[in-house]
Image (cartoon, grey):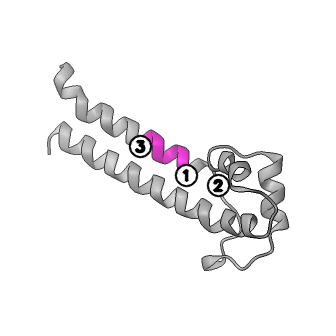
Amino acid sequence: MSRTHVGIAVSALGVLVLLLAVGWWWVVYSQVISNDYMSYPQAMPCLFASSDRCSLAQVLCRGNHFLGIKGYSVELVWAGLCLTCVGLFVADSRSRA
């Protein structure tokens, strides 16, 4: 398997992780938003960073979430971004060698 193929595979995994993170965020924060604890513009930063406001909104939300999900972890979105970037770097490194 060439470096380009490995890079593309790692990037694809990163995109999959990003989609999973956004889906996880949506499951948690759609309930928070529908219960009027936050608006979409207020909840969007919670996708990338944890804050007291995001934590409070998650705790106050007593909704019934899909699959019993109780909270959201920002580490997943950052892992997805890192995997995507590393994969793109590895796939592109052939042209620089």
**Front in this rendered view, residue 23 or 82:** 23
Up-down: is 75 above or below 4?
below
Disc 3 vs disc 1: Cβ atoms closer than 8 Å? no
- Give the structural element (helix, strand or loop) at label 2: loop
Q: Find out whether residue 36 is within the magenta segment.
A: no
Disc 1 vs disc 2: Cβ atoms closer than 8 Å? yes
- Give the structural element (helix, strand or loop) at label 1: helix
Question: Is 42 situated left or right of 5 in this image?
Answer: right
Q: Which residues are magenta?
A: 77-83
Question: Is 41 situated left or right of 16 in this image?
Answer: right
Q: Which residue is mark 3?
A: 83
Question: Residue drawn at (79%, 54%), measured in percent from left and top?
Answer: 55
- Give the structural element (helix, strand or loop) at label 3: helix
Placement of the N terminus among the 4 image quadrants: top left
Placement of the C terminus among the 4 image quadrants: top left
Question: Residue drawn at (80%, 65%), measured in percent from left and top?
Answer: 36
**Which SS does the magenta portion mostly show?**
helix
Looking at the rendered structure, the kind of residue marked 3 is: Leu
**For the residues marked 1 and 2, what is the alpha-carbon distance in whole angstroms?**
6 Å
Assess disc 2: are there few (<14), some (14-19) or many (≥20) residues with their C-alpha within 10 Å of its C-alpha. some
Residue 43 rendering spot, x and y as whole percentages: 70, 52
**For the residues marked 3 and 1, what is the alpha-carbon distance in whole angstroms?**
11 Å
**For the residues marked 2 and 3, what is the alpha-carbon distance in whole angstroms?**
17 Å
Q: Find out whether residue 82 is within the magenta segment.
A: yes
Q: Which residue is mark 1?
A: 76
Residue 72 is drawn in which quadrant?
Answer: bottom right
Question: Is 69 situated left or right of 79 in this image?
Answer: right
Assess disc 3: are there few (<14), some (14-19) or many (≥20) residues with their C-alpha within 10 Å of its C-alpha. many
Q: Which residue is mark 2?
A: 73
Looking at the rendered structure, the kind of residue marked 1 is: Leu
Which callout, 3 or 1, points at the residue further toward the start of the chain?
Answer: 1
